[in-house]
Amino acid sequence: MVKNVAAGDSVGIVGVGAMGLPIVKFLADAGFDVICSDVNQANLRQAVKRGGRAASALSDLSECRVVLVFVPTDDDVRSVAAEFALVSSAEDPVFVIHTSAQSTTCRELYEELKLAGIHVIDAALTGGVRGAGNGTISLMVGGDAEAIDAVMPVLEPWTAFVNRLGPIGAGQIGKTVNNMIHWGEIVAVIEALSLGSELGVSPVVMREALKVGTTDSRTLRELEDMNFTWYEKDTDNAVAMAAEVGRDLGFTEVVRGYMREINVDNVAQLLAGRGIVELTGELITLRDEPVA
C-alpha cells in the first residue's frame, strides 16, 4: 500500500512557468507545503507570492511526498528524476510526470525509480493555460492504481477530471491522441471557415450557425483564445509513438505542415470577417471592415 498524501505534507513543483505557477496557489490554499523549483528566478518570486516556498536546489525537495514535474523535454524529466532519486528521503514518494513526454520515457523512469523506492505516474494535461489558471485541467493518467489513489488529494484541487487510462505511459498516449485530434480540428475549421467566407458567408455569421449544429466544438468556440503553439512537439511525439507499432501517420504529418502556416494574426483576421487563410499561410484581404 502507498500511504495517502494529506494536507500538511510537502509537495514539490519542478517548473513554475505558465502551467506550473497557477497550481501553486491551489495547493497552498488546500493546505500543502508547496516547495517550488525553477531555473527562472522571476518565476520563483511569483510562486512565493502565491503561497509557495522557493527551493535553492532540487535537494530542498528531499522530504516531498509528491513531486509534480512541469519541465520542457524528456531529457529534462530524466535529469530531474535522476537528481530526485539521489536526494529523496520521504516515505512512499510519488514522482508525477506532467510534461508531454514519450510513453517510453515514462516506462523507463518507472522501472529506474522503483529501485530507489519512488513511485512514478504520468499525468499529462489538457485544458491549456486557462485551464490551469481556473482549476479546470483534465488529466490523462497512467500508472499503478495505489500510487494514483495516494496523490489524488494533490491533483483534485486544480483539476476538473482525472482520467485513468491504464498502466504507466498511458497518460502520455491519451494526451497524444487528444492532441492529434486538436490540431487536426484547428486545420479543418480554419480551412472550412475560409472557404465559406470566400464564397460569401462571413465567419462571424457562420460560426454562430455552427455552434448550434452538429459540428459545434470547444475548438470552434475558442479559436481566438489559442496561441497555436506546441504543435511541433505534439506531432513529433505522435509520430515517434506510432513508429513503435510500425504505423505511419499520414494525416498528422499533413496537419503539422499546415499548422506552420496558421498564426494568431491571420486567424484573428479570418474570425473578424476581414480575410481568409489559405493553407499557404497567406492572408488574402477581402474587405477593410468586419462583416456583421
Image (tube, rainbow, N blue to C red):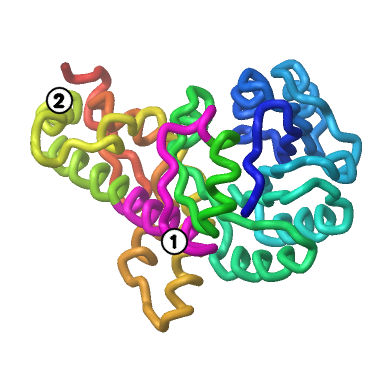
- The answer to whether residue 47 is above or below residue 193 is above
Residue 249 within the magenta-colored segment of the rendering: no
Q: Is residue 142 visible?
A: yes
Labels 1, 2: front one: 1
Q: Is residue 111 left or right of residue 42?
A: left
Q: Amino acid at mark 2?
A: Glu
Q: Please tell me whether the stretch drawn in magenta is mainly helix, strand or loop.
A: helix
The local secondary structure at tag 1 comes to strand
Q: Hey, which quadrant is residue 197 in on the image?
A: top left
Task: Find the magenta span and give its range.
Answer: 156-184
Kind of residue indicated by mark 1: Gly
Residue 257: image tag? none
Residue 166 got which mark? 1
Tell me residue 220's x, y (percent). Answer: 25, 35
Q: Is residue 221 left or right of residue 56?
A: left
Q: Nearer the viewer, residue 85 or 268?
A: 85
Q: Residue 68, position in %: x, y? A: 66, 43
